[in-house]
Image (tube, helix red, strand yellow):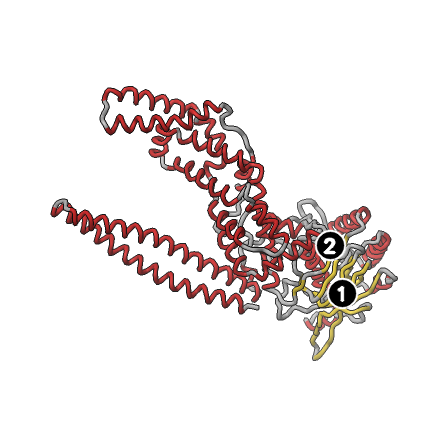
Amino acid sequence: MEEKFKKQISEHEIHLKKYTSIFNIVGNLKILLVIALAFSVYLLFRLGLSLNTIFVSVGILIILIALWIYHSIITEKINYHKGIISINKKQLDRISYNWDSFDDIGEEFIDENHPYSKDLDIVGKKSLFQFINSTNTYHGRQAFANDLLHPNYDETEILYREEAIIELSRNIEFSNKIQYFLQKIKPTPDILKLVDELKNDKIFIKSKITKNVLKFTPIITVPFAALVLIFNLRDLYYILSIVEFIQCIVWVLGIKKIATYLGSVTALPYKLNAYTKAIDMISLENFESQKLKEIKASLCSSDSSASKAIKDLDKIVNKINFRSNEVLYFVLNIILWWDYNCCIMLEEWGGKYSKTSEDWFLKIGEFESLISFSNLPNACNNMVIPTYIDEKNAIEAKEIGHPLIPNDTRVNNDISVNDNILIISGSNMSGKTTFLRTIGINLVLAQAGSFVCANRMTFSRLDIFTSMRISDDLNEGISTFYAELKRIKSILDEANKNKKILFLIDEIFKGTNSVDRLYGAKTVISKLNNLKAIGMVSTHDLELCDLANSRIKNYSFLEQYKNNEIYFDYKIQEGKSQTTNAKHLMKMLGII
């Protein structure tokens, strides 16, 4: 699996070495030419002006400028190959399961009250988000998190997403390039302000006459000023001064309106060029999957090309950013009414693109999310695209495993939940909790249109609700047991109004005494059974296994003892557990 990434790293390292060598040679040539140019200028002043010395000096200057431009091109190539190498090394970290050092854990998406996120390690430290996320824009991170936390796609959309993720997982080089260009963008929520500004087609100046005066007056006044100054027409100095004074007054009077209109664009911290390069790459790619074709069409339609529009916007932004040079900014506004014309250009841009501009950022985000899911089959073995079924509430899988467990230690199992409740019994550390999480996290992936960690899997569209990592809340004065009761109550309420849910309850009512625990657990399971909910409950209480009937099935995990040691195979089997290990563990630790 890792060979294809090592190959890419090797190829890009060859290019990096070549361009680094060129970079050093060009750098040394630049130093020599700077020295030569300084010497030629010295000769000009020392020996006097002559055609030969002027020609040599100009020639050196032209070559130096050309080398400077070429040097910047080589720098970009070096940065590109370094970036692609870094992206491929990150994928190797995923394969070797060294990904828990990745910085982005999706911290802002952590929600203690989410139906399953905390229990299934969807976001946060050592989470699915941290494992496969490769988004770089704000909209990309939002789209990916939403796909993990709120997947709500119908059968057709799931199929389209599956096809797109398969295609991207095979086109590694293309996906890496998209990641490289977009990683230059900061994923800050400030982009929302920009999007709001862009999609608002507000009018800067309603009067066409006023607008034309602002646009075309400099075409008259600039040549007039040039003529007066070049030919030293002293008689016209007074008129020129009045004209420029009027233009200055008009500009000053409009400063507040200009600042309000330009809004977030005046301090744009985004590298729009990175968007255009990514969009250009998408426009040149011949996709096979319907979803990727749709995204490409949204970004690259002839009537509203996102690439052209963002390039035009980038030009406007660059003009606006002249205000960082206060002297030049003042001169440009006095002579050319620079700010006014920037506002007019932005207004005209909005007239063309305001209705579609927000969708471009959303589509780029969707594309990034699909790329993130495509990382999964290139990091985990035993991956497959699952099959959606709608006629029943069911999850069936062969060799299903947990994608966050390393490939060499992962244990896979077969499972069939066909309108059933499974009571999973077994001793401590036998694998019950991990198995519940395995089912939950793979269903999340399946409903997002992604690969799952299994040899084969079919699934129904089910809302997932879990009760696993329950903790007390000192601020609210809530005990662990009461917190669990609230969680179980929410599952019952949801099952009462929604017949398509999957519940995953780990060690039900472990926070209370055995009598109350058993009574409460039997009551909850019976209610869930009557409500026709499907799900799994893990337990140490073997008495719960007596609830087995046509819908409620018993499964268990076992252990073996050898040389006073406990061995687990983490393989699920039908029937209730026949062994316990608490006393053995206490004996091993010398407690009894």
- For disc 2, the marked residue is 467
Residue 415, numbered label: 1
Question: Which quarter of the picture shows residue 210?
Answer: top left
* Residue at image location 47% in from the left, 27% down from the top: 257
Can residue 118 be seen in the rendering of this structure? no
In the rendered image, residue 107, in percent from the top left (x then y), is placed at: 59, 50
Can residue 486 be seen? yes
Q: Quadrant of the C terminus?
A: bottom right
* Residue sitting at x 70%, y 50%: 153
Disc 2 residue crowd, few under 14, some 14–19, many 20+, Cα 10 Å: many
Of all residues shown, which one is farthest toward the bottom? 563
- Relative to 182, 392 lies left or right: right
**Callout 2 secondary element:** strand
Q: Report the front residue among 302 and 155.
A: 302
- Closest to the observer: 131 or 380? 380
* Image quarter of residue 412: bottom right
- Quarter of the rendering occupied by the N terminus: bottom right
The answer to whether mark 2 and mark 1 are in CB contact below 8 A is no
